[in-house]
Image (cartoon, grey):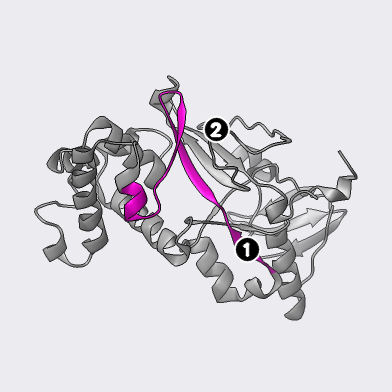
Amino acid sequence: MGRGRDWNVDLIPKFLMANGQVVKMLLFTKVTRYLDFKVTEGRFVYKRGKIYKVPSTEAEALASSLMGLFRKRRFRKFLIYVADFDEKDPRTFEGIDPKKTSMREVCKKFDSGQDVIDFTGHALALYRTDDYLDQPCCETIKRIKLYSESLARYGKSPYLYPLYGLGGLPQGFARLSAIYGGTYMLNKPIEEVIQNGKVIGVKSEGEIARCKQLICDPSYVKNQVEKVGQVIRVICILSHPIKNTDAANSCQIIIAQNQVNRKSDIYLCMISSAHNVAT
């Protein structure tokens, strides 16, 4: 297994959308001068016991067996609609009210079969359940546009992952903060969050640091949060690439809920020495 310092395994790994808000924020704050990112190699979905590659190009889409030929044509028509959609321009709505028309009605308009609906909602819009189908379609369309725009930036995948893992993000902000006189204190015990109608400070080892805003993990304010769900996570260390992923060094596999009779999706994120998380 090697030494502990040979591993940079994130307990909660998350891929970043290349054109998403987090990446835009990192670019705006110029934290990227302290970070290096790498595109993940593959995107796959699980369907009827097999792993299929999510197409990245029109040629791959035509050759893919994820959906039939006629479904592909209808799906392409839908993607063209999404690409042209502008929330501020009613001329792009084509009879759809993005604030009222449900996504289920949109799918019916484009004659999308169940396979296309599952692929669109879970592999592109990245919803974990099917609740979105009965909600206004605007948010789903924007999610699919974000996916397409992120994919267009690098062509191979819409996802980025920092070298040496997500721990590089707070480290980058720590270095940026130091330039502007900020202070980082690690392993500092928190005794109390001081509140007077709103948060005004944090007490630690008898000292109070006052503030106007506090960003913290929910565990620090347990009496003010309500549990609405839970996430089951498993970390596996493999000695080989995942089967049927073209020996990808990094990838995401989405297992839709209805493929395994669950109420929510399963996301598999695989990273390796290509992202310097292991040596």
Amino acid tagged 2: Lys
What secondary structure is marked by label 2? loop
Q: Is residue 108 above or below residue 143?
A: above
**Percent coordinates x, y for residue 252 in the rendering:** 53, 43
**Can see residue 125?**
no
Q: Could you classify mark 2 by the number of other residues whose Cα lies within 10 Å: few (under 14), some (14-19), or many (20 or more)?
A: few
Of the two numbered discs 2 and 1 on the same chain, state the one appearing first in sequence.
1
Image: 166 above or below 118: below
Can residue 54 be found in the magenta stretch? yes
Count of numbered labels shown in the rendering? 2
Q: Position of residue 154 (x, y in %)?
A: 48, 64
Which region shows up in magenta? Answer: 35-61
Find residue 66 and report its horizontal and vertical position in percent.
34, 36
Q: Nearer the viewer, mark 2 or mark 1?
A: 1
- Marks 2/1: CA–CA distance: 33 Å
| Residue found farthest to the top | 261
Residue 18 painted magenta: no
Q: Which residue is mark 1?
A: 37
Query: Which quadrant is the N terminus positioned in?
Result: top right
Q: For residue 212, which quarter of the picture?
A: bottom right
| The label number, if any, that marks residue 227 in the structure image | 2
